[in-house]
Amino acid sequence: STAAAALEEPIKPPVSVEYTQLLINGQFVDAASGKTFPTLDPRTGEVIAHVAEGDAEDINRAVAAARKAFDEGPWPKMTAYERQRILLRFADLVEKHNDEIAALETWDNGKPYEQAAKIEVPMFVRLIRYYAGWADKIHGMTVPADGPHHVQTLHEPIGVAGQIIPWNFPLLMYAWKVGPALACGNTIVLKTAEQTPLSALYVTKLLHEAGLPSGALNVVSGFGPTAGAALCSHMDVDKLAFTGSTETGKVILELSAKSNLKPVTLELGGKSPFIVCEDADVDNAVELAHFALFFNQGQCCCAGSRTYVHERVYDEFVEKATARALKRSVGDPFRQEIEQGPQVDSEQFQKILRYIRAGVDGGATLETGGDRLGEKGYYIKPTVFSNVQDDMLIATDEIFGPVQSILKYRDLDEVIRRANSSRYGLAAGVFTQSLDTANTVMRALRVGTVWINCFDTFDAAIPFGGYKMSGQGREKGEYSLKNYLQVKAVVTPLKNP
Ligand code: ADP
């Protein structure tokens, strides 16, 4: 039945594409070169729209607009309350257009419409309201001095922020980055991912309707090595934030260092362990591990992609995890009750199929899936491997697809050591009924987030980021503000000599 669903004629998306140009200085404009690139429907590989292709010259224009908007205002010079009200109005407008925005996101990315409409757009709204709430609560300190001095700190916006986002959660990544930067009074040049340029243009139009002054947020669609690299290398960009692969993160950091040493925050890849302890309720653990891996077609940086299961419950777990994957409904993401749509593009699709072949060749047991679904588009059958060993490619590399790898372990010390023996350190899940076990594992893991008996809980106030090669810095929550603030110490003698 899942195969049949994928093969049906694609449903006509309930939205049309209105904005395809770059958004610079409050205006929709063509690329300086006049070039465009097609953005594709992952259900079919067909063109949705041709989008203006920004490159270095457009980045220069956008940075100039952001610079002027920062240096001359009004955005950083407005009262915090005025900025807050604009962000709140923006959230209201996005909420009003929830369904169109969700439809654009699904069309461009392939994620289930129900997920976009019921989880992601509402979460976007929640994040923007959260950051709006911070706008008028950012302030410095009065600091005790040894001498007869009055010392205070000012928390000032850092300037022009360059932000580069990926395609897996185009809207949420926008909110994670744009929210804190604007709340702190910065101006921005945002480079969207070439696979998914559409939703950011739509919401940024709404942000201007909400009262954002021209130049405060500029959106440039385009490719990484051209537009993205130009943003990283720009001498007039004061801060850079990136979410994407670890490989590209290294390039970003290097370009930033070689140009003007702009500070960089990086949110990169992961290979997150999901540890099922011997006391776990197996049915719940199976369901949660399934969600941890397969959510968003497996295209999550924090996907629970190493499922470690205690030997005492291992056989039962493998059998049930396989049955659950077989039941997963895959098909047109605009259909109701679809759990999994297509992968985002042909490159990702091919890469995942290569990893599946590597799993088979490496000697893991393919329990189910292992192949594309249908003939058209980028659908992949939910895939489960058991008997996975730590040194296999499918256990070390980020696959970014619907491929679950199950590994067996014997005792807690062993699984902690194995979970930590990764170059990544983004997140982990622990499934146990014992508070002692949860506490022991939670403290021992070198990762930025530990979910205990839950996974992918992403409130606006919870900080997120990686240890090791999963990144630098934290996004969301109060921690994210410091990425976008400079601290100025001001010293005044208590009494002039
Ligand atoms: P993926 O491999 O999943 O597409 P990337 O890390 O390559 O992940 O892409 C994430 C974002 O980084 C996208 O917006 C992409 O255009 C951008 N990007 C890719 N390469 C570069 C680069 N050399 N310089 C700057 N940005 C880049």
Image (tube, rainbow, N blue to C red):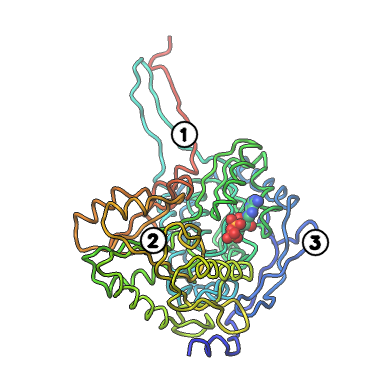
Q: Name the mark on residue 458.
A: 2
The reply to whether the residue tagged 2 has its Cβ within 8 angstroms of ligand 1 is no
Q: Label 3: which residue?
A: 34
Q: Residue at x 39, y 14 (%)?
A: 495
Depth-wise, is mark 1 or mark 2 nearer the camera?
2
Q: CA distance from mark 1 to mark 3?
A: 41 Å
Q: Badge 3, how many Cα within 10 Å: few under 14, some, many 20+?
A: few
Q: Quadrant of ligand 1?
A: bottom right
SS at badge 3: loop
Depth-wise, is mark 3 or mark 2 nearer the camera?
2
Q: Label 1: which residue?
A: 487
Q: Badge 2, how many Cα within 10 Å: few under 14, some, many 20+?
A: few
Which is nearer the N-term, disc 1 or disc 3? 3
Task: Report whether 267 appears left or right of 435.
Answer: right
Q: Amino acid at mark 2?
A: Phe
SS at badge 2: loop
